[in-house]
Each structure stands twice: as structure tokens, then as C-alpha cells.
Amino acid sequence: MAPEEELTSLQRRARVLERLDEGYKNLHTSLEGLDPVDAFLGSRWSVWEVLNHLDTEKFVAALEQIVAGDEDMLPPFNTRETKLKADIVHLDDNYRRFRKLVGSLTEAKMSQQVTAPNPENSFPGLTLLELVERSSGHWTAHSRQIVETRKYVEAFNARERAVTFIPLDPDRPSELGVLAVGLLKHADYVAGTPEALDAVRNSASGTELILNGKNTNEILSRLGRDARAGLWTVVCTIGSPSESHPEVLKAAEQHCDKVVIQQARK
């Protein structure tokens, strides 16, 4: 296939159409026979999340405006600050709408059945009042989640894309402090030798990566990439990594943007 610089604009357009058609066909082939339950499962990106990522409605709409002559340029991409502010404004507006709706409910409306029972998840049929009662605590529950997330963004040194080492006491490797337990609970990936992983398994909830002496560079390179992508990663060692596993610490310093050592009992 000729390089793009050797093609005419019409030939390049034809190639774009070929790629779009190929991608569309491959996408639907990949979805054949998919169980809706499985679509929402996955340790990183579920099928549903991939589909949402592929939703280019706003991009296509912007291009349509350019082609129609309504706009000359793509709109500037929102900064994270702008997007965050816009999302909060949207939530504020939704809160006011929801509160106004609830305040206007009559007794007759509140007693109206609005959901059918769902035996798949044991969800009962609900009246409108029961439904808004259940929904009214949703913000408080997730506010606690945000507070917890912000705490561990700081604890994981997430802004610096750090990988956290937790050296375990050789005599009492399962004895962990509150912060160490929290780090293990929230980490996306926990790496260590089989002995170290056995010691923390009751506290860790992330994916385990076993260090076997032969895959050190592979595992630490992966953790470095994952940390840069915003994931939270932990490496557990029995004893100080500089003494018991200097090769692991050296690989981490080579492949990761930053290495933080967090004492196990803290």
C-alpha cells in the first residue's frame, strides 16, 4: 500500500472509508453472542466502557457543522478544570430539578407503582415514593466515596504517578497498619512474591501479580505504565526492598516515574 503522501486526496478519503467500514464490521463481529451481563464485567475496561469510549457523536456533529459551513474549526478541547466545573454545574441543575419534582408530588402520585419487580437482582416493585426514598441517599453515599478517593489519591502520590512499596515485617508479615490496609484495599494491582502476597491477601482486593525472579522487569515495567495511566499499584516485599529484593527496587526505579516506600504498620 502506498504511503499517504503519495496518494491523492480522493484516494486518502477512500482509505478512510475502508478503515471505517472495516472497524464497523470488526466491532459487530466482536459483539456477536455477547451476554448483556458479561458486557459490564472487566478488571479494567468492560465491553460497555469500550462502547462508550467509541461514542463519537459530538466529534461527528462538530465535523458536520464544518462541512455544512456553519463552523470553520473544531471547538477547543475542554481542559480538565473546565470539564469539572461544567459537570458540577450539571449536577447542581439536576439536584434542583429533582428536588422540585419531589416537592410537587401529591399523595396520589406518590402511591403510584412505577417499577416492576426484577427477580434477577431481587429488586422489588416500587411506588414513586419508595423509588425517590431510595434515590435520596445516593448523593451522600457517593460523597463518602469521593472523600475516600481523594484521601487515597494523596496516599498513592497519584499526581506523581508513583508505585508504592510496602515492606512487610519478616516475623509478622500479616501485621498491617490502617494506611497500609487502605492502600492494599484500593490498589488496582498488588505485586509481590508468593509469600508476600499470601501475607496480604486478606487485605488486598486488586489483581495479584506474582514476582518469580524471572519476570521482575516485565512486572515493574507494567506497573510503571499502569501508574502513568492513573492506576494505583503496590509492591509488597518481605523485609526492606533494598535489602531483601534489591533487584525489584532497582527495576522499579528504572521503569517507574517515582517509587514511594510506605511502612507496613503505619
Image (spheres, rainbow, N blue to C red):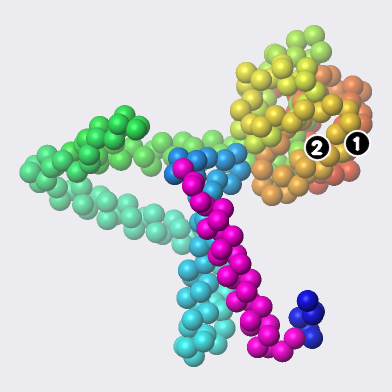
Left or right of 15 in this view: 139: left
Q: Residue at x 45, y 40 (%)?
A: 37
- Up the image or down, 110 lies above or below 234; here it is below
Q: Position of residue 79 (x, y in %)?
A: 59, 65
**Which quadrant would the N terminus be assigned to in this image?**
bottom right
- Up the image or down, 44 lies above or below 181; here it is below
> Quick one: SS at disc 2?
helix
Q: In the image, which residues are magenta?
A: 7-35
Nearer the observer: mark 2 or 1; the answer is 2
Circle on res. 250: 1
Q: Position of residue 77 (x, y in %)?
A: 58, 70
Nearest to N terminus: mark 2 or mark 1: 2
Residue type indicated by callout 2? Ile
Marks 2,1: beta carbons within 8 A: no
Q: How many marks?
A: 2
- Up the image or down, 3 lies above or below 102; here it is below
Q: Is residue 9 magenta?
A: yes
- Up the image or down, 120 lies above or below 5; here it is above
Q: Is residue 114 magenta?
A: no
Choose top left, top right, bottom left or bottom right for residue 200: top right
Q: Position of residue 264 (x, y in %)?
A: 73, 21
Label 2 environment density (alpha carbons within 10 Å; few <14, some 14–19, many ≥20): many
Q: Residue at x 46, y 43 (%)?
A: 35
Residue type indicated by callout 1? Lys
Secondary structure mostly seen in magenta is helix
Choose top left, top right, bottom left or bottom right for residue 248: top right
**Which quadrant would the C terminus be assigned to in this image?**
top right
* Closest to the observer, 127 or 123: 123
Residue occupied by mark 2? 219
Q: Position of residue 7 (x, y in %)?
A: 75, 86
